[in-house]
Image (spheres, helix red, strand yellow):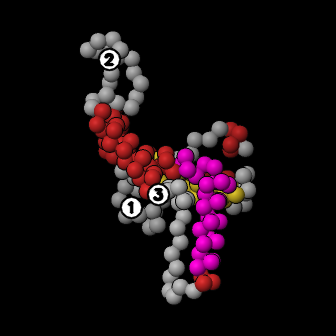
Amino acid sequence: LAEYIDDSELASLASELLADYQSDVDSRKDWIQTYVDGIQLLGMKLEDRTEPWPGACGVYHPILGEALVRFQSETMMSTFPASGPVKTQIIGRETPDKKDASLRVAADMNYRLTDKNKEFRPEHERMLWGLGLAGNAFKKVYYDPHMERETSVFVPAEDLVVPYGAKDLQTAERVTHVMRKTENDVR
């Protein structure tokens, strides 16, 4: 559509969208500050400390980091067992045909998520870390025309901007995914 809309109208739309986005970012400043404070409490940043002595550790208490790692590993074992992440359930009366179809669907989906979609598991692990860290985590699942297949990527909570008062993503006025792309990616 952008190719058919007048340039002045496009500039007006872009200005309005940027103002709305900035308003959404401003509305969640308290949440962002809490998130940054949480990361500092975990001691998850590298710094060259000189107090109380040169080279001192900056971790407040290792139990916070340990709890995050434990949450991620236990949740990963539950959501990604050795048999695969997909399980099926037959709704209604079970018949031999439905049972066979159910097994085929589970096998196909597990193959797609574990063999074809190589990024699914590592992105799932990153999502669980983000969930434990920020209290929110998002996964974006879409068809990637470059890879010619479906893909699944973790979207950190700080990169998904919605109006602060939104109840959920389905009814939010706007949902903005902040994407860091290189020029080659954009091309």
- SS at mark 2? loop
| Dot 2 alpha-carbon crowd within 10 angstroms: few under 14, some 14 to 19, many 20 or more | few
Q: Which of marks 2 and 1 is nearer the N terminus?
A: 2
- With respect to residue 97, does 47 lie above or below? above
Query: Disc 1 marks which amino acid?
Result: Ala
Query: Total number of numbered labels?
Result: 3
Q: In this view, does 20 lie to the left or right of 148?
A: left
- Of tags 2 and 3, the one toward the viewer is 3
Q: Tell me the quarter of the image containing the C terminus.
A: top right
Query: Which residue carries the number 2 mark?
Result: 56
Query: Which residue carries the number 1 mark?
Result: 166
Pick the front one: 3 or 83: 83
Q: Is residue 116 visible?
A: yes
Indicate whether residue 43 is drawn in magenta.
Answer: no
- With respect to residue 176, does 168 lie above or below? below
Magenta part mainly helix, strand or loop? helix
Query: Which residue carries the number 3 mark?
Result: 79
**Residue 171: image x %, image y %?**
44, 67
Q: Can residue 13 be seen in this view?
A: no
Q: Earlier in the sequence, mark 2 or mark 3?
A: 2
- Of tags 2 and 1, the one toward the viewer is 2
Pick the front one: 63 or 96: 96
Residue range of the region highlighted in magenta in the rendering: 99-123
Q: Residue 20 carries which label?
A: none
Query: Disc 3 marks which amino acid?
Result: Thr
Distance of label 2 from label 1 (alpha carbons): 43 Å
- SS at mark 3? helix
Pick the front one: 122 or 78: 78
